[in-house]
Image (tube, grey):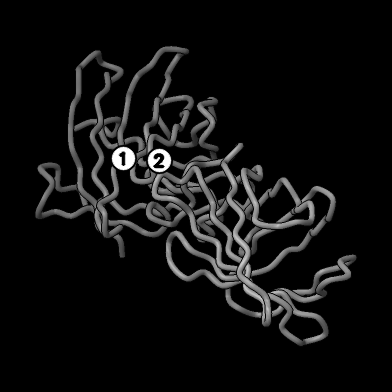
Amino acid sequence: MHKLALLGVVAAIQLGAADPRIGSWTLASAQSTVDPPNKISIKSVHHEVHVVISGDTHVDFTAKLDGHEAAVQGNPGFNQIEVRKIDKRQVEIKEKKDGALVATIRDKLSSDGNELTSVTSQTGRANLTKVWTRSGGTKAANDLFAGEWTEDLSKTRLRQGLALKIEADGNEGVRFSGDYSYTARFDGKEYNLKNSNNDTVSLQLVDPHTVDAIYRRDDKVAQRDRWVVSADGQQMTLTTTGTLETGQQVKESLVFRKQ
């Protein structure tokens, strides 16, 4: 079997593969008499997230999702923040002023990844709820695809012992390492391949568990892959169709397990 049939291991969710809120958000509604911020931008930066909240008030900080304090500059209400990932759809934020807790915020992503509900709790006050709608970025930001994967020989006809590594690149993209390598974003644009019989790859996020990839050679589509991760995040299935350089048509399915 030609190596082309095994190309395409192209999956990972950008996000710094951790924060489910990665992306851009616009305020839809808020329980507040004071004009709240109306836009949020959350980006992955190496092992941290860079958060910019803008509107009548402005907040800009970078923090890890490990519950440790990070400094916040230029905000009169709080000067420290803690961010902690609860699960694949929820994040807890604690705002502090000189070490004293000011507010606790619970962010929860909807199942389709397009709505973010934020509930703020403060001592002596009723909880305030804000609802944000996605205006940009990936529809889901979890680490289902990211990690190290090996071929499950018990479920694959082609027993070649493939090993893959998929990781976020810190710039809203993904780095893939296997028989070949590349760095690409989920924007449908073409990115160069290294050590491959194909020239470029383009990635598209279909849903939180599915990624499509198109490979081109000599400006023609040579291969199409679909990657699907199981609900528990432990199994990844590749369905690949393509044409070898010899003209032979190829269609195969491969199953991988997360290590």
Indicate the position of residue 202 as horizontal and vertical percent values: 47, 28
Residue 24 in view in this figure? no
Residue 111 in view in this figure? yes
Considering depth in this image, is 94 or 142 the residue closer to the camera?
94
Secondary structure at numbered mark 1: strand
Quadrant (top left, top right, bottom left, bottom right) of the C terminus: bottom left
On screen, 204 above or below 68? above
Q: In this figure, which residue is indicated by the disc labeled 1?
A: 227
Of the residues shown, which amino acid type is indicated by label 2? Val
Which residue sits at x=47%, y=42%?
A: 181
Secondary structure at numbered mark 2: loop
On screen, 248 above or below 9? above
Q: Quadrant of residue 245?
A: top left
On screen, 86 above or below 20? below
Q: In this figure, which residue is indicated by the disc labeled 2?
A: 10
Indicate the position of residue 139 as horizontal and vertical percent values: 48, 42
Indicate the position of residue 167 as horizontal and vertical percent values: 49, 54
In primary-sequence order, the first of circles 1 and 2 is 2
Quadrant (top left, top right, bottom left, bottom right) of the N terminus: top left
State if disc 2 and disc 1 touch (CB < 8 Å). Answer: yes
